[in-house]
Image (tube, rainbow, N blue to C red):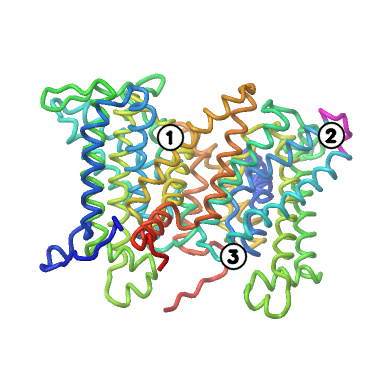
Amino acid sequence: MQFFFEVLIAGLLSGVMYALVALGFVLIFKASGVFNFAQGAMVFFAALTTVGLKEEFGLSLWLAIPITMVVMVLLGIATERIVLRPLVNQHDITLFMATIGLTFFLEGLAQLIWGSNVRRLDLGIQDVPIEFVMDKTGMLISQFDVIAAIICAILVAALAILFNKTKVGRALRAVADDHQAALSVGIPLQHVWAIVWAVAGFVALVAGLLWGSRNGVQFALTFVALKALPVLILGGFTSVPGAIVGGLIIGASEKLAEVYIGPYVGGGIEGWFPYVLALVFLLVRPEGLFGEKIIRRI
Amino acid sequence: MIYREAGQYKTTYDTDTQIFPIAQDRYAMLAILLIAFIVIPFVATPYIFSAILIPFLIFSLAALGLNILTGYAGQISLGTAAFMAVGAFASYNFMLRVPGMPILLAFILGGICAAMVGIAFGLPSLRIRGFYLAASTLATQFFVVWCLTKVPWFTNNSASGVITAQQIEILGFKFDSPQEKYLLVLGIVCVLALLAKNMVRSTVGRSWMAVRDMDVAAEVIGFRVMKTKLTAFAVSSFYCGIAGALFAYCYVGTVEPEAYNLDLSFRILFMVIIGGLGSILGSFFGAAFIVLLPIVLSMIVHVTGLPNSVTSNVELMVFGGLIIFFLIVEPHGLARLWQIGKEKLRLWPFPH
């Protein structure tokens, strides 16, 4: 039973990491209806830029992070300008493909500038079990995971405040609700989109730092986007809480399935199990757990 | 002046409903087929066959399959490569386990297996729409590839998972050289493309398009949405399955699960989008574009003499950039450009 809880908690904590990536998707989808496949590449780009600045230019981590943040914000704004603005009002799938194009571009750019070696990112957080918990209950829970979860919680709280309490947040919600209505009351649509992309870039940076210091900064980091997709469809594309809850469900069930079902079918089911799980949820609730209910009429 | 339909009168219903109603189109099509079947086999080099023409035709077929599903029936799928894998492995196993199995029948049976998998994974489309469906089709992609890797029966207990495809032999004639394989692929693609063209202009195709444009409305006027969506999945997967089998037998020569990864699915989706959603011709344009682009790019980049690590990344960037560029310039794909060109040609040399 203790082992069960250990797996469960490890799963929940890794679910938080998935949620972090999914959050970037949700922000952009909510505000502009774009399914941004490039979020994974943005995570990779951000992490690699931070490490690159640190290693190649000898900057300290605390200087490299703000510089990367600026780069990500500029990148977000440039994406809105160059890629999305000319494609306004196009078919959803066209926009989706454009973001896949952007994925290739960013992957190429990041590796062109910083090279394609695996780099280590050290945030100064040890990936060791917390002694206090180990002494009390005998469970091994990584300190790193807990800190990542706390950072994620702070980020979500900050986003919640941004969305609900500020003027920018009101504009964001208005745009998410109805583009044309928002435009007609004088909300500058394009500014809002630029802000959303910039915020998504920032979220990508946080995710990139945490994922990067966990697994090393390498090309495989772009695949975290694929981990985030089942989280998204489970939680609903338009819901921030959905991303968190979805992340927790996916993280926990994925780990439990790998440990308890995996051995019977040959292992390696982590790749598809989340998708099948999300699919089962979708059959009951086609818009995800917290997604907006789509009313279809003729 | 050359391309105009003035004076071509349609006096019977048959001429009114034929595939290419304009005489020039018919002649052009005939000329293209003649060139493809007779001239090219004599003039092309083995490199052109195996690096450009064969992959082009195979990817066209896969893109055609996906275009039926996405362009005509409006269901986005990111699992194309999985259906291709099913087709390839099913054909392989039919060839392996049934003595005296004719290879064309094995291809068709492979396609039918893919169609059945397509129906199974198409079932969620009855409830799930749009990007939710797209993301859940990734389940197909990962599950099928995982299944093929983990179950040794599919790969005939091969340790590496990489199997050499069997010899292609039809009625005692062996298809060995790239030239012969090209002709085989070309023949299959032509038959299937003709079938697809006829399907999309018949009742089936119209019901697909009705469901694509608005499934609620289609249901109200009496289309059976479930049947329509599932036939789209079945037909699309059948095409992809055959393309997958050809991919294994005529292009790479091996059957391995890893070849049918997510990247391949995306590539085929690119072909469909860049070629033009809802256009048979567009699938061919898109396939040509995506097959040729990396080759041309790598040639250009190699001329510059930069080190390898730089060129591969530059290629990736230019590829991504060009895709965005094409989407911005012509979001409806190359087929739309072709259509505009034809309109212009009709009026030429007059402005209106």
Q: Are marks 2 and 3 in contact (CB under 8 Å)?
A: no
Q: Which mark is residue A290?
A: 3
Near-viewer residue (A54 or B20): B20
Q: Which residue is mark 2?
A: A124
What is the x, y in percent for residue A19? 66, 51
**Image quadrant where residue B74 sits:** bottom left
Q: To which chain does the residue with label 1 belong?
A: A
Q: Does residue B71 lie above or below A174 as drawn?
A: above
Near-viewer residue (A295 or B170): B170
- Given the image, on which type of amino acid does mark 1 rest? Val
Q: Which residue is mark 1?
A: A265
- Mark 3 vs mark 1: same chain? yes
On screen, residue B221 versus residue A84, left or right, reads left
Q: Say which label, 3 or 1, has the lower sequence index.
A: 1
- Given the image, on which type of amino acid does mark 2 rest? Gly
Q: Which residues are magenta?
A: A55-62
- Picture quarter with the N terminus of chain B: bottom left
